[in-house]
Amino acid sequence: MILRKLRPQWKLVAVIWAAFAVISITTPNTEKKIILRRLKGIVFSSSIEPDVNEQDKLDILEKKATAVSSKYSFPLGRDFQLKGTLPPFNVKKNKLILFWTPWYLGNKWQDRFGNPKLLQYEGCPEYRCDFTNQKSRLSEVDAVLFKSDSFLITDLPRIRHPNQRWVWVEVEAPISLRGTNAMGSLEDIGSHQINWTMTYHSDSEIIAMNGYFVTIKYKQQPVRPNLMEYHAPTMSLYMNALNNKKTLYEVMGKEWREFVSRPKLVAWMSSHCPTSSRREDYVHELNKYVPVDMYGRCGKESCFVRGILREAECWTKVMRRLYLFYMTMENSLCDEYITEKLYHPLKYGLVPVVYGSANYSKFLPPNSFINARDYHPRELAQLLTDLQRNPVEYGRYHLWRGYWKIVVYGSFCELCYRLHNDPYTGHHKDIPQWRSEIEKCKDAPLNMFHSPAWKQIIHDRNANETHIKKEQTELSLGELKNSKILILYIFIIAFLAAIGTILLMRTLCPLLLTKLK
């Protein structure tokens, strides 16, 4: 009704301003924000931070026995006796550790995990522990250690003393033959007999590591030296050098040439094939693109020194002198399952190409290894070849050597530390179930490189990067499209506003002039 009474000029003005209002209201907020950002000259970008845990040292005593069901670890039935009453926890000068079962193949526990003198020499915070294999001293000991595959119901102590910890030690993957047998023995005896577990997994009360890093600058070492999170001060120094693009020559001087001047590219040693991880499939696929020298039962190369196979001499006289890279391939894909295969190449100056289910950044300094599961063998071959052609860049994979030295055996440091500092005596409920939950073992598919099945094991790094770039491109194009639409909106609004203003002025001006006259 109102529009009918208006003159044609006023009707046009009303329509123009109505269109202006509608366009303004319907313009998306995101598009407005995009324009505002661009008008203000703000640049948004993301930065890549190193995958390093810089948190403070954790309190190791916060880790308690999993599924603790009672305060004290009394054996339940089965002819066991509890001798005496439970005294209050007391600290004595030295803790005594009894090896109730032999180590694997009759070797000594100390050969695998070290001795008290070594604990003190390498700076363990608590080294006041003594070792014995004399079962007659059972009443004196603070901890009794059982090798998992020798933990038999027919060979257990008949008397268990108060405050005495029974420690179940397992270094094999649960899906291996020895690991499966160990689980069977444990189920027969009962997890409730065990106070502490000592396995390769960091969720155990004590880690049965195969190697670790010793800091060069700091005298006292962490309780868990195989985990990078306990090396924060040294890690900070190392990351500073890495981020500042320091070269191996700047850190180690003339010694750097020892690591970069080797004539051959990559080697692999193995005594077991096939395996559940199908590591042999990966190596054979890699061998299609670059020559891989395969030693042991899974290959044709021989590492015999003076007529017999000596692994130590194989490392010092063959691997150390000839190769830049070493294929560190685990036989089982279980979470955190890492063997001595990881630490030997580090010790003898090769860069490990790792293949397993561990988060290797948890155990190794950044830029000290290459994860084979991040690359299809074809792509890995290209990377290794590129590094071989660029000695300076290859040398940066050895930069960590200016900050740590490597040890290839385990440590009783954490066990000794706990015995002196942890008064808690709980026991486990179900160790087999706990292991199955945390270790997440899986088998790799057979002949995985004959089909796309390899994508179940290999994290397709390039595919992920391509996907990310595609998403970023689509996002940029979307923003650009939105920006163009918004600019068009603004142009139309400005045009309509200008037309409306002109018409308004043409209508008002004659009226004003008439009144003035």
Image: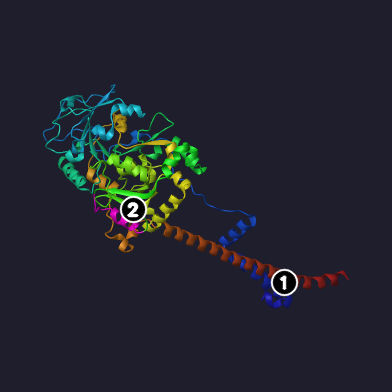
Above/below status of 2 relative to 412: below
Is residue 17 something that shows in the picture? yes
Instruction: Give percent across and percent down for residue 83.
Output: 16, 26
Q: Residue furthest front?
A: 306
Q: Residue at x 36, y 52 (%)?
A: 372
Kindly identify the amino acid type of the residue bearing the numbered disc 2. Answer: Val
* Residue 275 in the image, given as x and y percentages of width and height: 25, 52
Q: What is the quadrant of the C terminus in the image?
A: bottom right
Residue 214: name its quadrant: top left
Look at the image and give the residue range highlighted in magenta.
Answer: 272-288
Which quadrant of the figure contains the N terminus? bottom right
Circle 1 residues within 10 Å: few <14, some 14–19, many ≥20: some
Could you tell me residue 230's position as x and y percent?
39, 36
Q: Nearer the viewer, mark 2 or mark 1?
A: 2
Residue that numbered label 1 is attached to: 499
Q: In this view, does 59 lie to the left or right of 480?
A: left
Decide whether residue 273 is among the magenta residues: yes
Mark carried by residue 292: 2
**Which of 179 and 159 lies nearest the eye of the viewer?**
179
User: Which residue is painted at 13% across and 31% down in the image?
Assistant: 158
Residue 255 location (% of width, % of height)? 44, 38
Residue at screen point 56% across, 62% down: 479
The quadrant in which residue 134 appears is: top left
Report the Cα–Cα distance between label 2 and label 1: 77 Å
Q: Is residue 457 left or right of residue 185?
A: right
Q: Nearer the viewer, residue 234 or 204?
A: 234
